[in-house]
Amino acid sequence: MGRGKSSYDDTVDYKSKNLHAERRRREKLSSRLLTLRALVPIITNMNKGTIIEDAIAYTQELKKKVEVLTGMLQEMEVTSSEEEITTRINEIGACEEMKRCGIKEDVQVTTIEGDKLWIKIILEKKRGRFSRLMEKMSCYGLELIDSNLTTSKGAMLVTACVEGALGETFTVQQTKELLLQILKGI
């Protein structure tokens, strides 16, 4: 009835719930600040405000770097697509030049000492075609001993001495058919 103190306070349980909730909130905030502090490479001071300010500065710096790198990537994509178009035009021109000069794709295979074969391949000059040819030959068990590449008038001339990998032996006809099959696929 009066405002006097009583021996039992009804708000004790209520206050303790608030205290626990507040303690959990502070612990979560502290752990998240520690995580943020670990992620930001330069922290000038260890108080909460400075950690947040440094994190903001670092985030802005990263954002600027992203913008610069995005711009560079877009420039590279534009340049790359222009180069690709130029390369395709050059390849078409090279193909036409090869045909105009009367050069045709051809494969010749000759036996030389023992299991070694001498191959001569004439093919259209296209970007990456030589490396794909070498990869396929290696995949099919042809090991290059000596090779030479010459380009002229839109054509590539590949001459090489080859033998079967791991002691395999290839016949002239078998090798010629294999090389023709490879040329169709590249």
Image: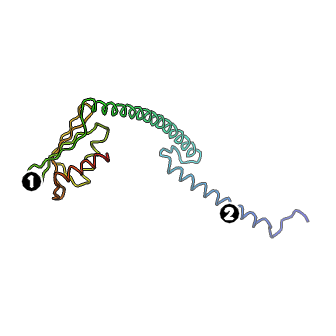
Q: Nearer the viewer, mark 2 or mark 1?
A: 1
Give the residue at x 57% y 54%: 32
The residue carrying mark 2 is: 20
* Image quarter in which the C terminus is found: top left
The residue carrying mark 1 is: 114
| Residue 179 sits above or below residue 67 on the image | below
* Image quarter in which the N terminus is found: bottom right
Give the residue at x 18% y 59%: 166
- Total number of numbered labels? 2
| Residue 100 sits above or below residue 50 on the image | above
Residue 103 in the image: x percent, y percent?
A: 24, 34
Q: Amino acid at mark 2?
A: His
Label 2 – label 1 distance at C-alpha: 89 Å
Residue 66 in the image: x percent, y percent?
A: 49, 39
- Quadrant in which residue 121 is drawn: top left
Give the residue at x 15% y 59%: 167
| Residue 35 sits above or below residue 50 on the image | below
* N-term mark: 2 or 1: 2
Look at the numbered disc 1 and give the secondary structure of its residue: loop
The dot on residue 80 is: none
